[in-house]
Amino acid sequence: MHGLINRSIQMFIRDTYGAGVWRDVAQEADIDPAGFEAMLSYDDGQTWALLEAASQTLGRSPDCVLEDLGTYLVSHPGLEPVRRLLRFGGASFVDFLHSLDELPDRVRLAVPQLDLPQLELVPVDEACFRLECGRRLPGFAHVLVGLLRTMADDYGALVLLDRPAPGQDGDHVCIRLIDNGFAAGRSFQLAAGG
Amino acid sequence: MEVMLDRPALDALMPMSLLADARGHILHAGPTLAKMRPEGYFAGQDLFGLFRFKRPRDIAAMAALRAAAGTPLRLCLLDDPQSQLRGAVVPWGGPAGGALLNLSFGLHVFQAIRHYTLNAGDFAVTDPTMDMLYLVEAKSAAMDVSHDLNLRLQAARIAAEEQAFTDTLTGLKNRRALDLVLGRYRRQGTDFALMGIDLDYFKRVNDTMGHGAGDMVLQHVARLMLARSGEGDTLVRTGGDEFLIVLRDRTDLEALRPRAEDMIRALEAPIAVPGGSCGISASIGLCASTQFDLWDTPQILADVDAALYAAKNGGRSRVAVFVPGMAPSQKDPEAKGRRLLARTLPPEAGGSVTDPPLRR
């Protein structure tokens, strides 16, 4: 697993629950408390052990932990660059949704070894989309739920998200758009530092 | 205002344009687009028969395409679903006319350049693709350098850690490593047996044949122990001529007794050293983690030491299994256990000395 993914989980636990909880989780997962380097690769088993230990220690289901991780990735002040890069996807939330098809390719452009699952947005009707998520990273759809919910707020869109149900070809998330321009949302300028 | 462009002007400004009439028949494909397929592939063909639209999804009529003006288009060639194209469309040729599309490779430009052997002349002068290619190549080169550095640093860190947990003379684990392993087993609730090994007559070798010969004997002993160990065994040199083997998931001490006796027999074979050969033996003490109600690492180590002490007192070259009430080897039963453990480890490294006893 790419170090960026493992390190995201580590930082999520540390920033959200504190360094002590991180040490407990690391110990439970039998992982060096010093944690992960972002640009190294690790054995996949460590990631699953980490998530299981986090779920146990926090007393939350793995799905909830992953959803919270998705929220953390685009809302924590220290991770503003992630939110910004996602906002490059489009001027409105719907444009942003359409840009998700290209997200894995964009990510690969920046970090060639980081292989995210294939994403495909399928419009069901005028206001309803199904985001299909490849199987490369089990549980990734749950991360997407947290991420999409927060990005909808960011754009000022009002949406309902349905938790993913695992399917034969991978997971999917159902997105019902109530209002693409419900609130002002957070400001975004293409030029950084604006 | 209306602008009239002839074909060369259109191709210079938009090398990937596609012009279709009201029926959707392709009137012209720009030169870069034309490079993607054999000559004459596009001209006169039905636009919707050659391309599949992903956004707006699956449109297949000119009216729908014209209505998509202002929406970013996503499409691919029908004969190659991997060919991802982006585009913009404007109505062309009056109210019931056709459409002019301007396409681009988007993110797939890197594959496209390789696949269709494109060059700078295939992109409009205003297209920043060349700058993007430059940026990506420069970034990749910089990332590669940084990645190499990461790997070297990581390898150095692992080597340094390995060294910190290794006894340099024998290559076996040292007391710091023992502490980590026992700490991990304690956390995981893993049961184990301890085999404490103390060499007999080793001092004589050291005294009569010199320290060089003594070191060779210790290395020989380590090799014998390694040859007789399996997965799940941790081999530790705890002191001068003292060794400890932690046997994971093994708690039947009587079943371990033959193995310990075999170890003693192997150690008693004459060992060749410069200037002759020498003979040693060993006393072995056994105890198991399941013998305790409380998980107290120093106590467990003190107990294996008590068994070892009993073996020595019983006449050496023998195996003794710990039973409660065995006399400790020193006045303070925990002193030896504590001495066996490194105290330099920070608590977050899993230091079990500082861990309170744990009820099993």
Image (spheres, rainbow, N blue to C red):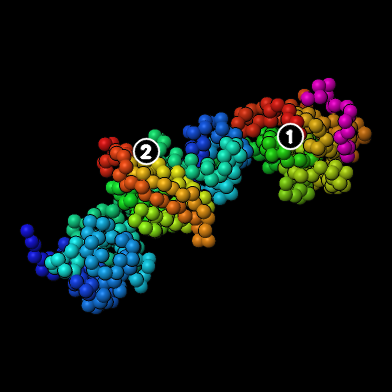
Q: Name the residue that disc number 1 marks.
A: B238
Q: Name the residue that disc number 2 marks.
A: A80
Residue nearer the viewer, B268 or A38 = A38
Q: Secondary structure at mark 1?
A: loop
Q: Quadrant of the N terminus of chain B?
A: bottom left
For badge 2, the amino acid type reads: Glu
Badge 2 and badge 1 both on one subunit: no
Q: Chain of mark 1?
A: B
From the viewer's perspective, is the residue at label 2 or at label 1 nearer? 2
Could you say which disc has been placed on residue B313 in the image? Answer: none
Main secondary structure of the magenta stretch? loop
* Mark 2 and mark 1: Cα distance apart in space: 51 Å
Residue A8, image x, y percentages: 47, 41
* Classed neighbour count for the residue bearing mark 2: other residues with Cα under 10 Å, few (<14), some (14–19), many (≥20): few
Residue nearer the viewer, B279 or B265 = B265
Residue nearer the viewer, B312 or B195 = B195
Q: Residue at x 66, y 39 (%)?
A: B166
Residue B119 covered by magenta stretch: no
Q: Residue furthest left?
A: B1
Residue nearer the viewer, A103 or B223 = A103
Q: Quadrant of the C terminus of chain B?
A: top right
Magenta residues (range) = B319-334
